[in-house]
Amino acid sequence: QVQLVESGGGLVQAGGSLRLACAASGRTFNSYAMAWFRQAPGKEREFVAAIRWGSGNTYYADSAKGRFTTSRDNNKSTVYLQMNSLKPEDTAVYYCAAGGPYYVVSYSNPREYNYWGQGTQVTVSS
């Protein structure tokens, strides 16, 4: 059983930072891609960032480049999303996702991921 649990969300002022964590359990994830998506009210789920667990290669949405960094800790089986210079438009529920053990090619497509966390709320005030 694969389980993903997000944490680290909260309320932050514009320009501030948050670090989200996604604790993954159930198996090893070397053949998985891990990703962060977000969803604001009335909007579709939006890709934020992804990381291939095995290689550590990362991929970012344009909205995240230069501000967000995703990484993983193999010993803790945890993926992180460090969010800096937060803007009010970053306000959303952030979800952790895992795709595998197949090879994820369309890493920004939520349909490529077969496991999802419950989400954590991020609110950025102006």
Image (cartoon, grey):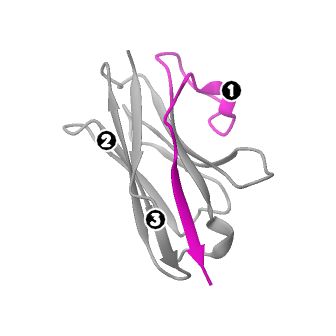
Viewer-nearest residue: 49 or 12: 12
Q: Earlier in the sequence, mark 1 or mark 3?
A: 3
- Is residue 110 a member of the stretch shown in magenta? yes
Q: CA distance from mark 2 to mark 3?
A: 19 Å
Instruction: Give the magenta range.
Output: 98-126
Identify the mark at residue 10; answer none if there is no mark: 3
Whether residue 69 is visible to the viewer of this picture, yes or no, is: yes
Determine the image quadrant of residue 110.
Answer: top right
- Dot 2 amino acid type: Thr
Q: Earlier in the sequence, mark 1 or mark 2?
A: 2
Q: Quadrant of the C terminus?
A: bottom right
- Dot 3 amino acid type: Gly
Q: Is residue 103 left or right of residue 24?
A: right
For disc 1, the marked residue is 111
Residue 94 in the image: above or below residue 30:
below
Crowdedness near tag 3: few (<14), some (14–19) or many (≥20) residues, C-alpha within 10 Å: some
